[in-house]
């Protein structure tokens, strides 16, 4: 993503507009594809938010998140301070 120090600035979050075609397709702007490493053939998950619309996330990014989350949960379960007496 552009400039990690300003990740949440509106300038770094806005990549333009898209139009939904008659088959429900949209084109992800080239700048956004480059910023997020999205390439032809990549699979994206579509998440819905009842107030904010949809988010597209690369499947491999979600898989990495799940792997880290799983490891963190396993380490937390191994912590002596968390074990019942």
Image (spheres, rainbow, N blue to C red):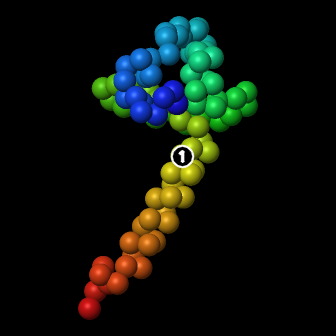
Residue 5's quadrant in the figure? top left
Is 37 placed above or below 69 here? above
Q: Residues within 10 Å of mark 1 (few under 14, many from 20)?
A: few
Q: Hey, which residue is sitting farthest left in the picture?
A: 85
Q: Is residue 17 left or right of residue 83?
A: right
Q: Hey, which residue is sitting farthest bottom in the picture?
A: 85
Q: Is residue 8 left or right of residue 65?
A: left
Q: Is residue 60 left or right of residue 66?
A: right
Is 41 placed above or below 29 here? below
Q: Which of these two is toward me, 43 or 37?
A: 37
Q: Residue at x 34, y 84 (%)?
A: 80
Q: Which of these two is toward me, 1 or 83?
A: 1
Q: Is residue 42 left or right of residue 10?
A: right
**x and y, in percent, of residue 13 in the image:** 43, 22
Residue corresponding to mark 1: 62
**x and y, in percent, of residue 63 in the image:** 57, 50
State how many labels appear.
1
**x and y, in percent, of residue 71 in the image:** 49, 66
For the question of whether residue 48 can be seen, the reply is no
Query: Could you say whether the residue bearing mark 1 is in a helix, strand or loop?
Result: helix
Is 75 placed above or below 12 here? below
Please identify the quadrant where the C terminus is shown. Answer: bottom left
Q: Residue at x 46, y 71 (%)?
A: 74
For the question of whether residue 26 can be seen, the reply is yes
Q: Residue at x 46, y 34 (%)?
A: 4
**x and y, in percent, of residue 26 in the image:** 58, 15
């Amino acid at each position: 993503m552009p400039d990690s120090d300003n990740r949440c600035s509106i300038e770094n979050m806005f990549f333009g507009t898209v139009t939904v075609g008659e088959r429900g397709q949209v084109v992800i702007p080239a700048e956004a594809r480059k910023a997020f490493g999205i390439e032809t053939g990549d699979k994206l998950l579509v998440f819905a938010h009842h107030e904010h619309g949809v988010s597209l996330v690369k499947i491999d990014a979600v898989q990495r998140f799940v792997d880290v989350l799983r490891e963190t949960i396993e380490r937390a379960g191994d912590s002596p301070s968390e074990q019942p007496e």
